[in-house]
Amino acid sequence: MTNLSKFYQKTWMQRLQALMDQQLISVEQRQLLEKSATDPAVGDQQIENYLTHYGLPEGLAFHYLIDQRRYLVPMVTEEPSVIAASSHGAAIVEKSGGFYTKVTDHLLWGQIVFEQVANAEKLKSLLEQQQEKLLQIANQAHPSLQQRGGGARYLRVRILASDLVSLDLAIDTQQAMGANMVNSMLEAVADYLREQVSTPVLLSVLSNLADQALATAVCRIPVELLARPQITGQQVAQKMAAASRLAQLDPYRAATHNKGIMNGVDAVAIAMGNDWRAIESAAHAFAVKKGNYRGLSQWQLKSDESVLEGTLTLPLPVGFVGGSTKIVPLVQLNHHLTAIKSVGELEKVMVSVGLAQNLAALQALVSEGIQQGHMRLQLRATVLAAGAQPAEVATIVTKMQQLQRTDLATAQNLLAKEHEGEH
Ligand code: MEV
């Protein structure tokens, strides 16, 4: 592998050549890497050892009515059914008057953790007494943030163990996600404290448990809008409320319940150039904040059981500027499509998408089941995996439905027969 050494120093073309020389890729594979590399110059600046751009499908979800405004929602996901489910959930809410949302301030926590603490209470009061000074040092490390109306707002000190203390700074990052800003502000404060106190600093970094950047969406659905072919709206609503309760009680179900919510949230996060891992870790940490891991949303019957009310609160450490937002042209296009103008508005859309996604999943789960409604989409993926050309997919999918088969081998057999017929 010696010729792959100093891979990072090679130009993009040299990297492809090195992989060829080492017989790690074929001519066709090199062509695929070249074809997929939509913007090698940009990719090379974004990450290390750049090879190519890995494409994911992007689609649009419709019917989003949020605080009386309509939104088109671009979603990037490889999972069949997510966008259809999103639009379906949003359409039910649209008929019910739309989503109502609220967002808190957009504060991120940054922590500076001290180890080998001799007297935790003493260190705590020492740090608290220095609040003004520490906030000032943090803000001096990023004066432009303060000029934009943001900056370090307050601090708290938590004693985690007799020898471990966390100093947490709440930082208003304005329109940005702000991870880099927070980290550089923390490091400035940590440097100052290293001179002031003899207790060693273990680490300083932002916390992804963004419980000071919350967004809530609520919807109230007349139960008749939830009816499915074999089951009344009233019954669907009762079962959805029961499924919601289940997700409060059982972490095994809660994990899946929340995965469904994040199917939508992540897809919007990616489309809008955000760090979806940060959003994921925030959501799951928040889901366990009260002790047990729980469903993030809740559904309850209200008004003599005539209305099903859904609520979802999510921590959303997202950004509307910074990160890849300016670098990736598709992100700019998606900003334009949604017509979202601020980080708060982005949070409102994301939390509404999460609730719509959850609504669609629960409605399907308690009625016909998740598979049936989405079978055609799942079948399309199987038929593509069997090697079908896009133009052949519909025919093979229909044949598989007639045979009531869903497996890859059947798809391959049908495809082979189709090809035989052509000769
Ligand atoms: C699949 O990606 C997501 C669901 O499993 C969510 C759920 O069960 O609530 C359908």
Image (cartoon, helix red, strand yellow):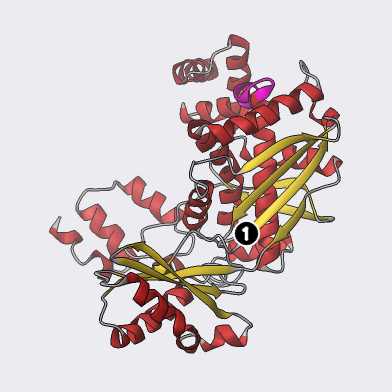
Q: Position of residue 66 (x, y in %)?
A: 78, 53
Q: Is residue 373 visible?
A: no
Q: Work out which residue is located at the far left of the displayed protein and give it.
A: 2
Q: What residue range appears in magenta?
A: 366-374
Q: In the picture provided, is 301 more to the left or to the right than 9? A: right
Q: In the picture provided, is 363 more to the left or to the right than 41? A: right
Give me the residue at 85% from left, 41% from top: 96
- Let me know if residue 257 is in the magenta part: no
Q: In the picture provided, is 394 more to the left or to the right than 252? A: right
Give me the residue at 70% from left, 50% from top: 352
Occupied quadrant, residue 316:
bottom right
Tell me which secondary structure the magenta stretch mostly adopts.
helix
Q: Does residue 368 sit above or below 201 in this rendering?
A: above
Q: Does residue 358 sit above or below 199 in this rendering?
A: above
| Helix, strand or loop status at disc 1 | strand
Mark 1 Cβ inside 8 Å of ligand 1: no
Q: Which residue is mark 1?
A: 214
- Let me know if residue 373 is in the magenta part: yes
Q: Position of residue 12 (x, y in %)?
A: 34, 65
